[in-house]
């Protein structure tokens, strides 16, 4: 119980620190070139680390340490992924973001989680999540999407 409490304190502290950061988009010339602040990749990384900690590491480590069978583990993955999708924009985001949550959970489990190598599993799912988000941001920037 102490470990879970400590993990929550770390996650909340990180959220508080992150809330003080800002993202700046600088427009150059006639507005055709937009430059993202150097802090954007850092902010994305912090956000991804928090999400992976809350939605992958904590619930899957809990389930694996309690020796959940495959059906129970699948239920944990589905519940956490549904919640992950919902928090990314409501009910309409449950399917797309929830599917992404399932994929990231599989990455976590296959890259060390099933063998209780949680550090490696966390790093792999965090790196996958970060790369996906950064690719999404680059394409959004190229296509001129300002809100999603």
Image (cartoon, rainbow, N blue to C red):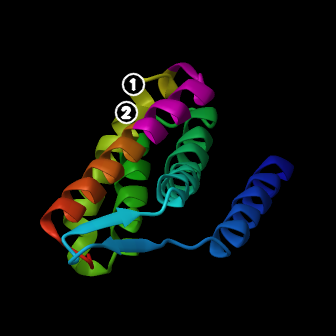
Q: Nearer the viewer, residue 137 or 83?
A: 137
* Left/right of residue 9 with respect to residue 66 in the rendered view: right
Please name the predominant secondary structure of the magenta segment in the image: helix
Q: Position of residue 11 (x, y in %)?
A: 69, 59
Which numbered tag is attached to residue 99?
A: none
Residue at position x 54%, y 35% from top? Answer: 122
Where, quadrant-wise, is the C terminus in this rendering?
bottom left
* In the image, farthest residue toward the left: 143
Residue at position x 50%, y 22% from top? Answer: 112
Write down the residue under mark 1: 110
* Left/right of residue 126 with respect to residue 131 in the rendered view: right
* Mark 2–mark 1 CB contact (< 8 Å): yes
Q: Position of residue 114 (x, y in %)?
A: 48, 24
Using the rendered image of the protein, determine whether residue 71 is visible from the camera's viewpoint: no
Q: Nearer the viewer, residue 76 or 144?
A: 144
Q: Is residue 3 above or below residue 85?
A: above
Using the rendered image of the protein, determine whether residue 35 is visible from the camera's viewpoint: yes
As helix, strand or loop, the secondary structure at mark 1 comes to: helix
Residue at position x 57%, y 43% from top? Answer: 57
Please identify the quarter of the rendering in which residue 73 is found: top left
The residues colored magenta run 115-127
Residue 125 lies within the magenta run: yes
Please identify the quarter of the rendering in which residue 143 is found: bottom left
Write down the residue under mark 2: 107
């Amino acid at each position: 119980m102490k470990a879970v409490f400590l993990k929550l304190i770390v996650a909340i502290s990180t959220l508080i620190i992150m809330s003080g950061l800002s993202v700046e988009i600088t427009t150059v010339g006639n507005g055709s070139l937009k430059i993202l602040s150097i802090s954007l990749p850092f902010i994305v990384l912090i956000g991804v680390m928090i999400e992976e900690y809350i939605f992958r590491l904590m619930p899957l480590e809990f389930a694996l340490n309690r020796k959940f069978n495959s059906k129970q583990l699948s239920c944990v993955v589905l519940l956490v992924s549904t919640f992950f999708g919902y928090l990314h924009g409501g009910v309409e985001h449950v399917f797309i973001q929830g599917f992404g949550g399932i994929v990231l959970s599989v990455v976590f489990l296959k890259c060390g989680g099933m063998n209780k190598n949680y550090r490696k599993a966390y790093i792999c799912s965090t790196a996958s999540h970060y790369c996906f988000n950064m690719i999404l941001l680059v394409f959004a920037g190229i296509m001129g999407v300002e809100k999603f």
